[in-house]
């Protein structure tokens, strides 16, 4: 097998070419990176970033793996949760606070009570 240079996307939205998808699939021997399930012909699979782009990962071949659609969605959800938590901690650390919301509720008669006015 001849050596080929690693594919690196020009930007994060660059589509992964079919020949690179095939190399990624072959590197993992057709097994889903997340669920360790064999990807069969006709199964929907996607190229997944091992370290998510939003968490500092790079859009390059060495940071990609094949993943079935359902486990990939679960991992993406978890990655976004981690990113949101990191953003909250960072904002708190540098002194940026979340805007306070005005709490209100409805009484049984339908009138709205604001927490500021109740005091």
Image (cartoon, rainbow, N blue to C red):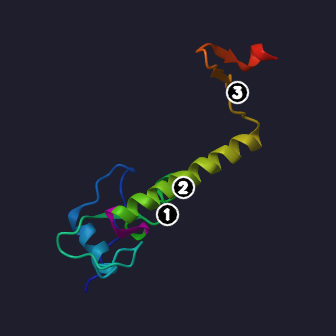
Q: Which residue is mark 3?
A: 100
Quadrant of residue 20 within the rendered picture: bottom left
Q: CA distance from mark 1 to mark 3?
A: 34 Å
Magenta segment, principal secondary structure? strand
Quarter of the image containing the C terminus? top right
User: Is residue 68 magenta-colored?
Assistant: yes
For the point 68% across and 22% down, the residue is 102
Give the label on residue 51, or none: 1
Secondary structure under the numbered disc 2 in the rendered image = helix
Give the magenta range: 63-69
From the viewer's side, name the closer residue of 26 and 77: 77
Q: Residues within 10 Å of mark 3 (few under 14, many from 20)?
A: few
Secondary structure under the numbered disc 3 in the rendered image = loop
Quadrant of residue 31 within the rendered picture: bottom left
For the question of whether residue 60 can be seen, the reply is no
From the viewer's side, name the closer residue of 70 and 93: 70
Quadrant of residue 111 within the rendered picture: top right
Q: Is residue 109 left or right of residue 75?
A: right
Q: Which residue is mark 2?
A: 55
Please provide percent x and percent y for residue 60.
Answer: 40, 63
- State if disc 2 and disc 1 touch (CB < 8 Å): yes
For the question of whether residue 82 can be seen, the reply is yes
Decide which of tag 1 and tag 3 comes sooner along the chain: 1
Q: Is residue 89 left or right of residue 52?
A: right
Q: Residues within 10 Å of mark 1 (few under 14, many from 20)?
A: some
Residue occupying the far bottom of the picture: 1
Q: Residues within 10 Å of mark 2 (few under 14, many from 20)?
A: few
Please provide percent x and percent y for residue 28.
Answer: 34, 79
């Amino acid at each position: 097998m001849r050596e080929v240079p690693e594919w690196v996307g020009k930007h994060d939205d660059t589509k992964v070419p079919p020949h690179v998808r095939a190399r990624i699939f072959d590197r993992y021997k057709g097994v889903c990176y997340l669920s360790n399930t064999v990807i069969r012909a006709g199964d929907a699979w996607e190229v997944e970033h091992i370290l998510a782009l939003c968490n500092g990962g790079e859009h390059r071949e060495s940071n990609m793996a094949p993943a079935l659609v359902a486990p990939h969605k679960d991992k993406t959800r978890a990655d976004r949760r981690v990113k949101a938590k990191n953003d909250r901690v960072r904002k708190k650390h540098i002194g940026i606070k979340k805007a306070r919301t005005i709490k209100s509720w409805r009484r049984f008669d339908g009138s709205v009570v604001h927490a500021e006015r109740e005091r």
